[in-house]
Amino acid sequence: MKRFFGPSTLVAAAFIGPGTVTICTLAGVQTGYELLWAMLFATLATIVLQEMAARMGFVTRQGLGEALNTHFSRGIARYVVFFLVIGAILIGNAAYEAGNISGGVLGIDLIVGEYKLWPLVIGGLCFALMYWGTYKWIERILIGLVLLMSLCFLLTAVMVRPGLGELLRGFVPGQLSGDHFLLALGLIGTTVVPYNLFLHAATISKKWGKDASLKDVRIENSVSILLGGFISSLIIITAAGSASAVGEVSTARDLAVQLQPLFGQSANWLMGAGLMAAGVSSALTAPLAAAFAARGLFGWPDEETHPKFRAVWMLILLIGVLVAITDVERVLIIKFAQVTNALLLPFVAAYLLFMANSRKVMGRYTNGWLSNGLGTLVILITLLLAGRTLWLMA
C-alpha cells in the first residue's frame, strides 16, 4: 500500500480544493455527464506534468527552485526568472490559500453551522501541523483526508443513482457549446495547479531514495493522481445525477442544501465533510509549496525547521486566514484563486518543460518525444485557458 501513496498524494490533496469542488459541481449541474471526458483529460494532463516534476526531483534530488539555480547560474536571465517564479508562486499561493480556508469553512458550516471565527480555527490547525508536525505526519494526514473525500463523494454519487449508459457516454468527447467549452477549460485549469509542480519535485526525495526505481515513482504518481481525478469525477456525477431534482445550484454548498430534502441530513454531512477535507488538505499544501519554492530559489538549508522556510509558509497562511475572515463572499475568493491559477499556469508549465529538456539538469533522463508532445499540448491548452480568462476580465 505504501508504494501507491506518498508525494503524489500531496498533489492530489492539493488540487482537490474548494475550487475543484465548485467547478465540478457547476459542470455536473449545467452539462450533466457530458464533461466527464474533460475531467479525464485534465487528470491525464496532470499526470504528464507531475511526472516531469517527479522525475526531475528523483534524478537531481532537488526541487524546481534548485534546478533553476543550476541552469540559470548568472546573468540578467537569472534575475528575471527569479522574479517571475517567486512572484507567481507567492501571489498564486496566497490567493489559493484564501480560497482553501474559505472552502473549508463552507464545509464546516454545513456540518455544525456558521461561526465567524472558523477561519482562525482552520488556520490554527494548519499552523500547529506545519510547525510541530513532521513531513511524514503531514503526509499521513493528507492521505487520510484524500481517502475521506473519496468515501464522502462516492457515497453521495451512489445516493443519486446515476444512469450507467449516460455516465459512460460522458467519457466520449462531443461538440462543445460556448458555456460547455468554458466549463471544460475550467476543469483543466482547476486540476493542473502550478504550485504542485514545485511541491512534488521538492518532496519526492523524502519517500524515494537513490536506490528506488523511476518506475516506482511513476506508478505512485499515476495511482495518486488518478485517485484525485476519480474524486473530481464523483463530484460531477453527484451534481449531474441530482440536477433534475434540485433548484438553482452554483456551489457544492447549494447542492448539499438542495439534496437535504431528498436524502436527509446525511447529504449535508457527506458534502460538508468532503468540502471541509478539500479545504483543509489544500490549506496545508499551498503554504508548504511556496516555502519549498523559495528555499530552492534562494538556496536556504534543506530543513523544514529553518526560520526562513517557516516564515514563508506562515506568511501565506496568515494572508489566507485574514482574507477568509473578512466579509468578502467566500465563493468570490475561490473564483479569484482560479483566475490567478489560469494566468500563472502556462508560464510555470513552460518553465518545467524547458527544464525537463535540459541535459545540464536532467542528464540522460531528459524528456522523450512523447513527454514533449503531451507537455506541449497541455501548455497550448493552458494558454487558451489564460486567454479566455483575460478576455472575460476585459
Image: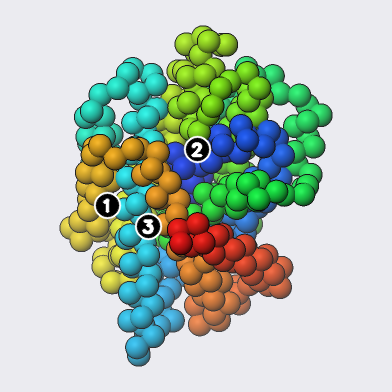
Bin the neighbour count of mark 3 within 10 Å (Cα to Cα): few under 14, some 14-19, many 20 and up.
many
Q: Can see residue 249? A: yes
Residue sitting at x 66%, y 46%: 180
Instruction: Find disc 3 in the rendering and name its residue.
Output: 92
Task: Give the foreground label among 3 and 1.
Answer: 3
| Occupied quadrant, residue 70 | bottom left
Nearer-the-camera pick, 137 or 188? 188
Amino acid bearing label 3 = Gly
Residue wearing tag 2: 22
Crowd around label 1: few <14 · some 14–19 · many ≥20 (10 Å): many
Out of 218 and 317, give the one closest to the viewer.
317
Query: Which numbered disc flags the more N-terminal residue, 3 or 1?
Result: 3
**Mark 3 vs mark 1, CA separation in Å:** 10 Å
The single residue placed furthest to the front in the displayed view is 394
What amino acid is at disc 1? Ile
**Quadrant of the snapshot with the N terminus:** top right
